[in-house]
Amino acid sequence: MAVAKIDEIEAGQHTTVAASDTIVTGLTTVVAVVATLDANPGDNPLLVSASVGDQAGAPAAGSFYLKTWKTDGTDPTPVAATTFSKKVNWVAYGTRS
């Protein structure tokens, strides 16, 4: 298990515009991020996930990917959401130089 030093915390609310949005946090580097739908889930979107990536270009340092997911109603395997304008709350932990 990797352990990273965390100096700062940023939080916000994002309204989705695509199945994968890049969120700029204001941190220099994002070490970890947590995200949750602001309202009750439906079939589309059903889930939200967040990824810090490599912080060296995918996504850019200080950013993270916020993704929303749906199911097709019969297969429970999540696929990229197609309904947007959903509010997602997030908290990012990281460093600021």
Image (tube, grey):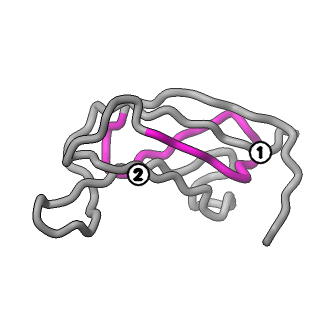
At x 52%, y 52%, the residue is 50
Q: CA distance from mark 2 to mark 1?
A: 20 Å
Q: Residues within 10 Å of mark 1 (few under 14, many from 20)?
A: many
At x 20%, y 59%, the residue is 71
Residues rendered magenta in the picture: 16-36
**What is the number of the mark on residue 67?**
2
Residue 24: x %, y % from top left:
58, 38
At x 19%, y 48%, the residue is 43
Q: Which of the pair 22/4 is nearer the observer?
A: 4
| Quadrant in which the C terminus is drawn | top right
Residue 18: x %, y % from top left:
31, 45
In terms of sequence position, does the residue under pointer 2 or pointer 1 come before the other?
2
15 left or right of 44 in image: right
Dot 2 falls on a residue whose secondary structure is strand
Among all residues in the image, which is located at the extreme left? Answer: 74
1 left or right of 77 in image: right
Q: Amino acid at mark 2?
A: Lys
Check if residue 92 falls in the magenta segment.
no
Q: Which residue is mark 1?
A: 94
